[in-house]
Image (cartoon, rainbow, N blue to C red):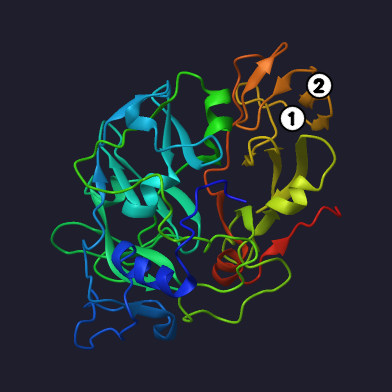
Amino acid sequence: MSGVRRNPGVALGLVTAAAVALAGCGEPTRPGDEGGEFFPGECDLEARYLFSSPVGRGGIPILDNPEFISAQPSEENSYLQDGDRVIGLVRNGQALAIPHNILWYHEIVNLDGEEPISVTYCPITASSLAFGREAIDGRRFGVSGVLFMNNLIMYDIGSGESFWPQMFGDARCGPRAGTVLSRVPVVEMTWAGWKDLYPETLVVSSEVNISRDYATNPYGDYDSIESDEFLFPQMPPLDRRRPVKERVVGLPSVDAEPGIAFPFQALIDEPGSWSVVNATWNGLDAVVLWSDQRQGGAVFHPKHPDTGDPLTFRAETTSGIVDDQTGTRWNAAGAAVEGPLAGVTLDPFEEAYTAYWGAWAAFHPTTRLWEGDN
């Protein structure tokens, strides 16, 4: 369902070997075992779901400020096909695409500037998140070589390092334990979909001085919706209400407030090429805007970002996503593209992100599940 090229010669056993080299997660070793990763201070994480590898910190080469190039076809972006998935964001008015193809091999892309950020993707949990780096004084994030419930654990590079499970978004080990990272809103969808929304987008070039075949997914068919297990067994019992490898877009649990997950297949099953879902989360109204064609969408505050006036939305077969108040047409990235509000962009929920359902339910065990019946 991801639209990426497969390596037909990679069986599941070889996928494990690929992950050893790519995700910093070799044959599981207990923290402190010979060859295992040393943890920075006390850890607020269940030990039974932690494991480390001989690859160690930095075993996965992160990218710092890679070159971004035009979306116009070129040798430097030929690794991408239209069905490949990208993490899209708009930064300082410029649309940027960071493809999964790049992140299969690097997992973290650090972007400097006035407001430095890190764009992250864990191929084992299919979780796409971006974070501001002000909480770590602008330092870069790296791949720790340790996983928690199969999810990437980042570390802040430098002295006094801490460990940050990606799907939690806060420090759970080390001197910064308890520190929460700010979220940067992103949209995950196909490369063709992102280009259609943002023709002037820039995308990461394959010329990064590291020899990788970005046209080939080293995890093979691991992300197939028919695959019902995670790469490593250090997981709680899996929630089987949806396929383990089905992607969901969701809002996480906050304190006593349960999260909510919107499965891709349930959104696809809605009639037409677009879907609109109204929901509430943490006492706030929310709306999911979804495009089947682009295989993606995001969660927004359903109100005019300037006036605060409430907006309600509907999906029409021919017109796409339309608001009831003005008849303006919107895209799945929350931008008004035609009508009285053209040029306005809805405020996204920064907390929302995409991941495999099995990983989402493990990190948010009290989550609500939307299945098209409300």
How many numbered discs sit on the rendered protein?
2
- Disc 2 is placed on an element classified as loop
Q: Picture coordinates of residue 277 (x, y %)?
A: 77, 43
Q: Picture coordinates of residue 338 (x, y %)?
A: 70, 14
Q: Residue furthest left?
A: 159
Q: Is residue 172 visible?
A: no
Q: Is residue 374 visible?
A: yes
Q: Residue at x 60, y 31 (%)?
A: 333
Q: Are marks 2 and 1 in contact (CB under 8 Å)?
A: yes
Q: Residues within 10 Å of mark 1 (few under 14, many from 20)?
A: few
- Disc 1 is placed on an element classified as loop
Q: Amino acid at mark 1?
A: Pro
Front-lying residue, 83 or 354: 83
Q: Which residue is mark 1?
A: 310
Quadrant of the rendered structure where residue 297 is? top right
Front-lying residue, 337 or 80: 80
Q: Which residue is mark 2?
A: 325
Q: Residues within 10 Å of mark 2 (few under 14, many from 20)?
A: few
Q: Picture coordinates of residue 334 (x, y %)?
A: 62, 30
Q: Residue furthest top?
A: 340
Q: Residue at x 59, y 62 (%)?
A: 253
C-alpha separation, residue under disc 2 versus residue under disc 1: 9 Å
Q: Residue at x 44, y 47 (%)?
A: 100
Apparent side of residue 132 relative to residue 287 in the rendered image (left or right): left
From what the image shows, is residue 305 above or below residue 289? above
Quadrant of the rendered structure where residue 33 is? bottom left
Q: Amino acid at mark 2?
A: Gln
Q: Residue furthest front?
A: 9
Q: Residue at x 48, y 36 (%)?
A: 88
